[in-house]
Image (cartoon, rainbow, N blue to C red):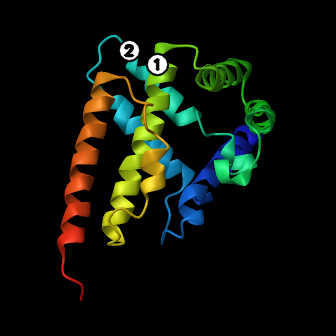
Amino acid sequence: MGSLLQFLRLVGQLKRVPRTGWVYRKVANPESVSDHMYRMAIMAMVTEDKTLNKDKCIRLALVHDMAECIVGDIAPADNISKVEKHRREEEAMKHLTQLLSEDLRKEIFELWEEYECQSSEEARFVKQLDQCEMILQALEYEELEKRPGALQDFFDSTTGKFSHPEIVQLVSSINKERSTEVAAANNDPPS
């Protein structure tokens, strides 16, 4: 039981690891990694796509950034190669899963590996959810901080990355709402 407690405490660190991209952009009160993973899991839960294994999608969403409780949220701006990032995260996942029973160790590590390798339809769907959740969060920060259009680089980074019909539709709604807000801000007379 002691190693399970250690696992849960380590994973609990995700509640206190802020998402690096928001920190670098000086967003007030940036979300944590677990905040991001939670909404992704909800997004997976509400998919209408009957061809996907919804349970697996939820599990992938909950596991995909789990290593960040040890390695932190490594962002592209950190100039760490994808190979090195993967090596660090794999080492962290091996450490984390060693704290679990053999069955759980295998299940969680294999889910993480499936996401990393993008080896299933579910993993590819969850990767798109990851990007979609990020731009939804960017929209919300622009609204909260009354800075329409300020987080454009997050939107630019996702160009051409969406193909799942439900996600394409959601992204279209996000972009439409954002365009309206940016246009309204640009038409406001200076104060």
- Image point 40% across, 48% down: which residue? 135
Q: Quick check: 176 left or right of 7?
A: left
User: In whole angstroms, how far apart are the C-alphas of marks 2 and 1?
Assistant: 6 Å
Report the disc number at residue 122.
1
Asked if residue 81 is positioned above or below residue 122 in the image, the reply reads below
Kindly indicate whether the residue at mark 1 contacts the one at mark 2 (C-beta within 8 angstroms). Answer: yes
Q: Amino acid at mark 1?
A: Glu
Image point (72%, 24%), residue name: 101
Residue 163: image location, x then y, percent: 37, 23
Q: Determine which quarter of the picture holds residue 103.
A: top right
| SS for callout 1 | helix
x, y percentage for residue 85? 75, 39
Hey, which residue is sitting farthest bottom in the picture?
191
Identify which residue is drawn at 80% across, 37% down: 84
Most foreground residue, 39 or 23: 23
Instruction: Work out whether residue 111 or residue 169 is closer to the camera in this orientation and state it.
Output: 169
| Residue 172, image x, y percentages | 26, 38
Q: How far across and how far down the image is residue 18, in percent?
A: 58, 59
Q: Is residue 67 left or right of residue 156?
A: right
Q: Quadrant of the N terminus?
A: top right
Residue 166 bears which disc, if any?
none
Pointer 2 residue: 52
